[in-house]
Image (cartoon, rainbow, N blue to C red):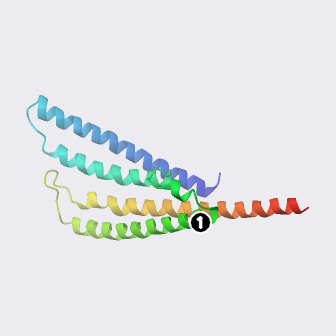
Amino acid sequence: MNKNIDFKITLLNTVKIISSICLFGMFIVVILGVIFRYLMAYPAFWTDELARFIMFYMVMLGSVIAIRENRHPGLTFIVQSFSKKVQSFFFYLIHIMILFVLVILAIKGYSMFVEGIIMKSAALRISYAWVFIGLPIASLLMIVEIFIKIILNSKKEKEDIVKEYEDIDKELL
C-alpha cells in the first residue's frame, strides 16, 4: 500500500480513537457528576470543569474528522451547478481560505498555550496549557488534512485531463 495512504489512514484512525476515548471519558465524568450531586448529595465540583475540557478536545478532534470526511457544512449544490473548471477554482479557493484561518488559529492557539502555562484551572488546579494545547494541535492536524485533500485533488484533476485527451485521441483515430 502507498505510504501516503497509510499515513492518512493511520492519522485519521488515531484521531478517531482519541475522540472516542474523549466521548467515553466525558460520559463517565458527567455520570459521576450526576451520581455525586443527586444520589450522594455531595456535588463533585470538578466534574463540570473536566467535562468542559474534554468537550473542547472532542470538538477540536471532531473538526479534523469532519474535514477529512467532508462532513463540514457547505453549499455544495451551488458549486455543483458550475462547470468543472469553476468547481475546481472554488475547491482551491475555499481550501486556501480554510488554511488561512487554520494558520491563524494555530498561531493564536500557541499564544494561548504559552500564556496558559502559568494559569491554573479553578477546580482541577491544572495548568490551562493542557487545555489550550488542543487548539494548535487540532489546527495543525486540520492543516495536514487540507494539504492531503489539495494534493489528492490535483492528482485526480491531472488524471482526468489525461483521460480526456486519451478519449479525444481515440475519437480522432
x 59%, y 61%: residue: 82
Q: Is residue 76 above or below residue 147?
A: above
| Residue at the left extreme, as displayed | 41
Q: Is residue 157 above or below residue 24?
A: below
Q: Position of residue 157 (x, y in %)?
A: 66, 62
Q: Position of residue 121 (x, y in %)?
A: 17, 56
Residue wearing tag 1:
86
Does residue 128 appear to the left or right of 166 in the view shown? left
In front here: 173 or 51? 173
In front here: 8 or 164? 164
Residue 86 position by quadrant:
bottom right
In front here: 41 or 151? 151
- State the SS at label 1: helix
Q: Position of residue 123 (x, y in %)?
A: 14, 51
**Circle 1 crowding by C-alpha within 10 Å: few under 14, some 14–19, many from 20:** few
Q: Position of residue 11 (x, y in %)?
A: 49, 53
The three-letter amino acid code for the residue at tag 1 is Val
x 23%, y 35%: residue: 31
Q: Is residue 49 above or below residue 34?
A: below
Residue 97 position by quadrant:
bottom left
Q: How many marks?
A: 1
x 13%, y 28%: residue: 39
Does residue 109 appear to the left or right of 115 in the view shown? right
In front here: 74 or 155? 74
Quadrant where the C terminus sits is bottom right
| Residue at the top extreme, as displayed | 39
x 23%, y 69%: residue: 115
